[in-house]
Image (cartoon, rainbow, N blue to C red):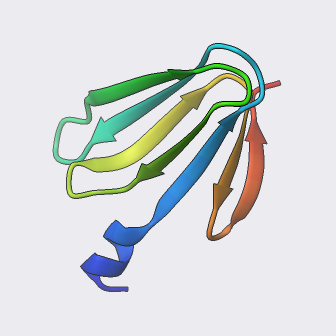
Amino acid sequence: MDKEHVLADFIVIKALDNGVQVYGLTRGQDTKFHHSEKLDRGEALIAQFTEHTSAIKIRGRALVLTRHGSFETGD
């Protein structure tokens, strides 16, 4: 898989409850939080993996849609 294809990947996060938190984590030797969003029920966020974002952490109940399928987070 080439770099452009990997960086084009994105996910959709739809909050199923109020207060869902989404964090972007950096690439490199030291993984750090670099961005955060708070979603309320029904709100959606489209997130993309980039040269700076290597991981996305989701805290709370949400529906996550990816090109590989979908799943729910939380309880």
Is residue 42 left or right of 51 when viewed as pictured? right
Above or below residue 37? Residue 65 is below
| Residue that protrudes farthest toward the bottom in the picture | 1
List x then y, in percent, for residue 14.
68, 38
39 and 61: which is toward the camera: 39
List x then y, in percent, for residue 1.
37, 86
| Residue that protrudes farthest toward the left in the picture | 29
Q: Residue drawn 26% across and 77% down?
A: 3
67 and 39: which is toward the camera: 39
Above or below residue 59? Residue 27 is below
Quadrant into which the C terminus falls: top right
| Residue that protrudes farthest toward the right in the picture | 75
| Residue that protrudes farthest toward the front in the picture | 43
Q: Residue drawn 73% across and 23% down?
A: 41
55 and 17: which is toward the camera: 17
Q: How many marks?
A: 0
- Which of the 4 quarters of the picture holds residue 31? top left
Q: Residue drawn 75% across and 27% down?
A: 74
Is residue 75 left or right of 22 when viewed as pictured? right
Is residue 15 left or right of 9 when viewed as pictured? right
List x then y, in percent, for residue 37.
44, 24
List x then y, in percent, for residue 71.
76, 50
Q: Residue drawn 39% across and 25% down?
A: 36
Above or below residue 8? Residue 64 is above
- Which of the 4 quarters of the picture holds residue 19? top right
